[in-house]
Image (cartoon, helix red, strand yellow):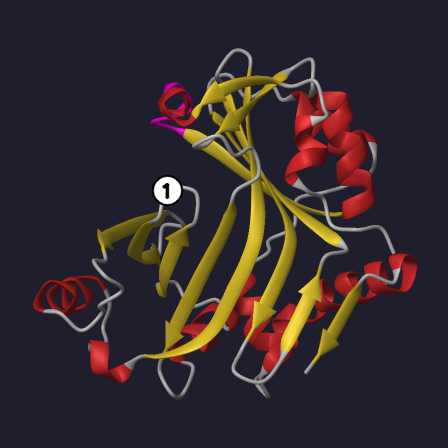
């Protein structure tokens, strides 16, 4: 089994670097978002082909910082079920720990009936969730009270962020993905989740061209939804094609496994 991609591996590539502050130049008023799921071995080869077209973002001296998130839902998994059933309006609630900076935010992502995704967040001090400010924030952003929500899933992964030389595209590549609940862990180190965000009016992409050339097509992937589908006894019909894809990578590369 190939070891997980590491910070040293990225430093050994020949990417030009930019700071996190420069990423603001790649924010788009109107954008196209595309997400892909690929085997990690091919993602490593893809990085080699992108060195002459993209910067890698350096975040407090790290090129591949770790992200840790705690997701919350009701006891009935109401938010998961809404995503599974593709309801027009749905939510995700998480606490995200940005390990590079030490910042912690409570984040709410809302999928609107128009297909837009809105993200709101509030900074968490001293890891204290039960505060008046947090209670007010939850009340304003989701149709649940804070005391109705419990932690259902933890996610851990490393993220590489790339920005095209013309600043018309921002790419994230998530590696070494672990999905956990209180009793089990699913290791998805066989896959890389790639997301491209690019300017609607300048939408050419070296990355997308490479993916299409290799036969990869857009594929929705939610760490929260797949984590719940794999770790809990819940309805999973609409996620079966994606789970089948994960099992395919497991069979081909022997790198996807679940362990207690």
State which quadrant residue 44 falls in.
top right
Report the side of 229 relative to 61 (left or right). Answer: right
Left or right, 139 with respect to 79, comes to left
Residue sitting nearer the eye, 91 or 125: 125
Q: Position of residue 50 (x, y in %)?
A: 70, 22
Looking at the image, which residue is at 68% across and 35% down? 8
Question: The N terminus appears in which quarter of the rendering?
Answer: bottom right
Q: Is residue 236 visible?
A: no
Residue 30: % across, % down: 38, 28
Q: Choose between 215 and 162: the one closer to the eye.
A: 162
In the picture as drawn, the residue positioned furthest to the left comes out as 132
Quarter of the figure that contains the C terminus: bottom right
Residue 63 coordinates in the image, percent (x, y): 56, 33
Query: Residue at image x 20%, y 67%?
Result: 138
Residue bounds of the magenta highlight: 25-30
Dot 1: element: loop
Assess whether residue 80 is covered by the magenta stretch.
Answer: no
Q: Is residue 105 visible to us here?
A: yes
**183 sits to left or right of 29:** right
The answer to whether 126 is drawn above or below residue 21 in the figure is below
Instruction: Please report the residue visible at 72 percent of the width from the left and 34 percent of the height from the top.
Output: 9
Q: In the picture shown, does residue 66 fall above or below 222?
A: above
Location of residue 140 (image quadrant): bottom left
- Towards the viewer: 99 or 219: 99
Which residue does the numbered mark 1 point to in the structure image?
101
Magenta stretch encompasses residue 28: yes
Q: How many marks?
A: 1
Residue at screen point 43% across, 49% down: 99
> Farthest residue toward the right?
252
Which class describes the residues within 10 Å of circle 1: few (<14), some (14-19), or many (20+)?
A: few
Question: Magenta: predominant secondary structure element?
Answer: loop
Q: Where is residue 174 in the image (x, y as percent from the top left)?
A: 61, 46
């Amino acid at each position: 089994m190939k070891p997980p991609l590491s910070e040293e591996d990225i430093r050994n590539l020949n990417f030009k670097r930019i700071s996190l502050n420069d990423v603001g130049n790649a924010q788009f008023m109107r954008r196209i978002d595309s997400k892909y799921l690929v085997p990690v071995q091919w993602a490593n080869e893809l990085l080699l082909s992108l060195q002459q077209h993209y910067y890698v973002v350096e975040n407090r001296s790290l090129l591949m910082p770790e992200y840790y998130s705690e997701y919350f839902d009701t006891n009935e998994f109401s938010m998961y079920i809404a995503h599974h059933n593709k309801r027009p309006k749905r939510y995700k609630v998480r606490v995200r720990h940005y390990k590079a900076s030490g910042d912690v935010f409570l984040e709410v992502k809302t999928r609107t009936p128009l297909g837009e995704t809105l993200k709101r967040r509030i900074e968490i001090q001293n890891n204290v969730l039960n505060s008046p400010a947090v209670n007010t924030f939850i009340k304003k952003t989701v149709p649940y009270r804070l005391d109705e929500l419990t932690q259902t899933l933890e996610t851990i992964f490393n993220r590489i962020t790339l920005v095209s030389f013309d600043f018309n595209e921002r790419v994230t590549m998530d590696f070494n993905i672990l999905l956990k609940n209180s009793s089990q862990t699913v290791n998805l180190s066989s896959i890389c989740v790639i997301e491209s965000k690019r300017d609607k009016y300048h939408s050419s992409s070296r990355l997308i061209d490479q993916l299409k050339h290799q036969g990869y097509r857009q594929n929705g992937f939610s760490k929260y939804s797949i984590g719940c589908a794999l770790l809990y006894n819940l309805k999973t019909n609409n996620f079966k094609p994606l789970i089948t894809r994960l099992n395919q990578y497991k069979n081909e590369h022997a790198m996807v496994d679940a362990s207690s």
